[in-house]
Image (cartoon, helix red, strand yellow):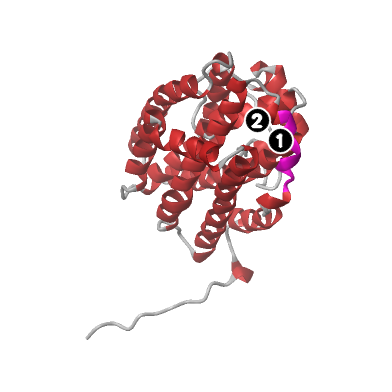
């Protein structure tokens, strides 16, 4: 005779994991509506940018839209399947909704800056046909489709905390030159969501990681660094394609070193590259600091509650 199923209500009054409770509180603070950010007020200034910078900005939003679609449709759903309790699943439900807002925001920015449907669609098509973006999606999706919970979390953190920033760089760098302030406001909202995505999932990765034996930890460590190397090698090609004719390629490479270090640190691993906040380009740092406090963007340390994010310095 089949055993009867037993269903249990989720009791938020008895949540034992403070991270889940804190993350939920943080999530409610960062919901936004993209259409309420008056990007249209940046149109005139955008139209006076050099043509290469206009193209770079449009293609950056196309790139963000593609990466965000993978996170929204696949990554968060797959990671949620491994949730240890209903509260963790609820947080991932909320993160998936917030990623959907970001996804809409990137398309909204393209619509506001494009002078025609054809120009807007060109940015989407550029991203969809970009061989390096497609390779990145395949690399990440292969991990997401696996049954390995800890690897899925690592891949998610690399995209949320590290790789997104190759496309965030352009608008932040322009804002560091006091250009496109409303666009920077949109990026600020998006960054808060992607950052919390990386923080929260990094904490869950570390929870799983420290349950492993020393030998298993070493295997995961090696796998994480191997994935980082593969993603970075591909990202360099994408950066050179996205930023061609702008002269910004080297600056973006240094910034991605910095954000990949942050991803590794969110995963409890040692940073791989020499870059830190002091070595960032001053114009970029200005963009970060003026669009929102830098501790709103980066990242979590074990010794502090999730609501008290601050810069990690090594």
**Picture quarter with the N terminus:** bottom left
Hey, which quadrant is residue 293 in on the image? Answer: top right
Pinpoint residue 233: horizontal percent, then vertical percent.
Answer: 40, 22
On whether residue 41 falls in the magenta region, the answer is yes
Q: Earlier in the sequence, mark 1 or mark 2?
A: 1
Secondary-structure class at tag 1: helix
Please name which of the two marks, 1 or 2, marks the residue nearer to the observer.
Answer: 1
For image coordinates 47% across by 41% down, the residue present is 66
Whether residue 309 appears in this view of the structure is no
- The residue that disc 2 covers is 171
Q: Is residue 182 above or below residue 258?
A: below
* 213 with respect to 102 (left or right): left
Which residue extends farthest left?
1
For image coordinates 74% across by 45% down, the residue present is 38
Q: Is residue 115 above or below residue 197?
A: above
How many numbered discs sit on the rendered protein? 2
On whether residue 312 falls in the magenta region, the answer is no
- The residue that disc 1 covers is 43
Q: Main secondary structure of the magenta part?
A: helix
Are there few (<14), some (14-19), or many (20+) residues within 10 Å of tag 2?
Answer: many
For image coordinates 61% across by 69% down, the residue present is 12
Q: What span is colored magenta in the figure? A: 37-45
- Give the alpha-carbon distance from disc 1 to disc 2, as whole Å: 13 Å
């Amino acid at each position: 005779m089949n055993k009867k199923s037993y269903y249990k209500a989720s009791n938020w009054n008895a949540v034992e994991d403070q991270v889940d409770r804190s993350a939920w509180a943080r999530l409610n603070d960062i919901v936004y509506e993209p259409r309420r950010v008056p990007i249209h007020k940046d149109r005139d200034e955008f139209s006076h940018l050099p043509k290469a910078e206009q193209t770079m900005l449009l293609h950056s939003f196309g790139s963000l839209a593609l990466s965000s679609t993978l996170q929204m449709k696949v990554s968060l759903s797959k990671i949620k399947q491994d949730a240890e309790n209903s509260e963790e699943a609820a947080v991932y439900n909320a993160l998936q909704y917030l990623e959907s807002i970001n996804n809409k925001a990137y398309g909204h920015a393209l619509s506001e800056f494009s002078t025609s449907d054809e120009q807007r669609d060109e940015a989407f098509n550029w991203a969809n046909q970009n061989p390096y973006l497609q390779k990145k999606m395949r690399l990440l999706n292969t991990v997401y489709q696996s049954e390995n919970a800890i690897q899925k979390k690592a891949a998610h953190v690399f995209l949320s905390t590290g790789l997104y920033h190759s496309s965030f760089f352009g608008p932040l760098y322009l804002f560091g030159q006091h250009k496109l302030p409303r666009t920077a406001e949109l990026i600020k909202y998006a960054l808060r969501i992607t950052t919390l995505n990386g923080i929260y999932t990094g904490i869950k990765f570390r929870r799983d990681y420290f349950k492993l034996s020393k030998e298993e930890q070493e295997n995961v460590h090696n796998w994480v660094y191997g994935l980082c190397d593969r993603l970075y090698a591909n990202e360099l090609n994408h950066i050179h394609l996205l930023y061609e004719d702008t002269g910004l390629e080297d600056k973006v490479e240094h910034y991605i070193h910095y954000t990949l270090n942050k991803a590794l640190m969110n995963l409890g691993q040692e940073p791989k590259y020499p870059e830190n906040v002091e070595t960032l380009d001053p114009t970029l740092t200005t963009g970060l600091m003026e669009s929102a406090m830098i501790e709103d963007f980066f990242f979590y340390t074990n010794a502090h509650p999730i609501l008290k994010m601050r810069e990690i310095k090594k």
